[in-house]
Structure formats: C-alpha cells, structure tokens
Image: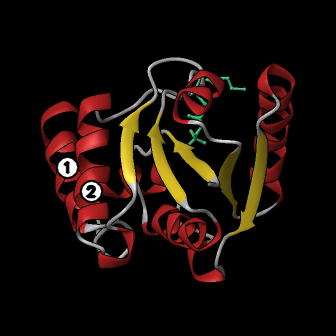
Amino acid sequence: MSIAVCPGSFDPITLGHLDIVRRAVRLFDVVVIGVARNASKSALLTPEERVEVVRGAVAAESDLAAVRVEQVPGLLVDFCRQVGAAAVVKGLRGGADFDGEHPMAMMNRHLSGVETVFLPAEQRFAHVASSLVKDIARHGGPIDDLVPPAAAEAVRAAVAHRA
Ligand code: PNS
C-alpha cells in the first residue's frame, strides 16, 4: 500500500494546498496531511487551530473523505516513519518554492530515505500563499476565494483578536 504525507505549516491551509492534496489522493492509496511547525515562520494560528481548520476543510470535500489530518509533533521524517509513508508530497508554485523545498527534500532523504514528490501548482493558485492571505485579512481585505471557509473564519477571528 502506498502511503504519502502532505506536510505543511498550513497557517492557514489554502485552496492551492487542497488542490495538491486532491491530486496526491489520485496517486497514493493513503494520504495523511501532516500539520507541522516551520521553524523559520511565526504562526498566526495555534497548532491545534491549524489541525482543526484543515480537518474542517477536508471534511467539506467529498473526494477527500479518506484523508487523515494529524499534527506533526517533531521531525517530519519521524512522522513519516510512524505512519509508514515512503513519500512526501509538496506543491511548487515556481522557482522560489523549489529553492526552499529542495534542501528540505534532500535533508529528509538523508535522514530517513523518504522521497519527496513535487507537483507543479495549478496556474490559478500560483499567487496564493498563506502569508499573503494573512496580510490581506489583517487589512480587512477579501480572502474567501483563496482559502476554504473554515480557514477564512479562523484567520479573520485570529487577526481580530491577536493582530
Ligand atoms: O508549509 P511550509 O511552511 O512550507 O512547510 C514546511 C514544513 C512545516 C513541512 C517543514 O518546516 C517541516 O518539515 N517541519 C517539521 C520539522 C522538520 O522536520 N524539520 C526539518 C526539515 S528538513
């Protein structure tokens, strides 16, 4: 059985992330979304909120019914080992994403042998980034066509109370 992990900080999950998960579901028998901590980013949503939002987003999509969503407590490679995943799936919007992802992919393979499969992002999501979504929300701008409804709600609540 082929098992893949779709990891990310998902702060918040975007429609671009969901598209990658949907495409991973067509390639692997089991897909687990791993909500992890990115040491180089400070998150708006707590890890528990991010997991809850991702679960809500996945639950709203009938074709993602079998996708599990879990928190990654430490290293991604340990999580992959724990769930039995031989592959990590990540989306690439362009060269900047590749520059960031390539060292992580190589390091994860160095640490555990896990392979990373890159999927090119759909062009219509090439500009969609969690960081931009948060910036737009902080200024009261529209984010509903960039993220799932559960994410839009959580981000608006968080920026209203924490920003
Ligand atoms: O959505 P992001 O921020 O691009 O995802 C990056 C993430 C969270 C997948 C990466 O930072 C990660 O794997 N974090 C878990 C800790 C870890 O394994 N660090 C070593 C990476 S080589």
- Label 2: state its secondary structure: helix
The quadrant in which residue 43 appears is top left
Left or right side of 55 for 16? right
**Other-residue count near label 1 (Cα within 10 Å), few / some / many at <14 / 14–19 / ≥20:** some
In the picture, measured across the screen, residue 76 lies left or right of residue 160, that is: right
Q: Is residue 74 left or right of residue 104?
A: left
**Count of residue discs:** 2
Q: Nearer the viewer, residue 75 or 95?
A: 75
Residue 124, image x, y percentages: 58, 82
Label 2, residues with CA under 10 Å away: few <14, some 14-19, many ≥20: many
Q: Is residue 119 above or below residue 100?
A: below
Residue receiving disc 1: 154
Q: Amino acid at mark 1?
A: Ala
x 78%, y 24%: residue: 112
Task: Tell me the kind of residue under disc 2.
Answer: Ala
Residue at (65% x, 69% y) in the render:
27
* Residue 45, placed above or below residue 32: above
Q: Picture coordinates of residue 67 (x, y %)? A: 40, 58
Contact check, label 2 and label 1, Cβ < 8 Å: yes
Q: Quadrant of the N terminus?
A: bottom right
Asked if residue 88 can be seen in this view, the reply is yes
Badge number at residue 151: 2
Q: How is the image coloured?
A: secondary structure
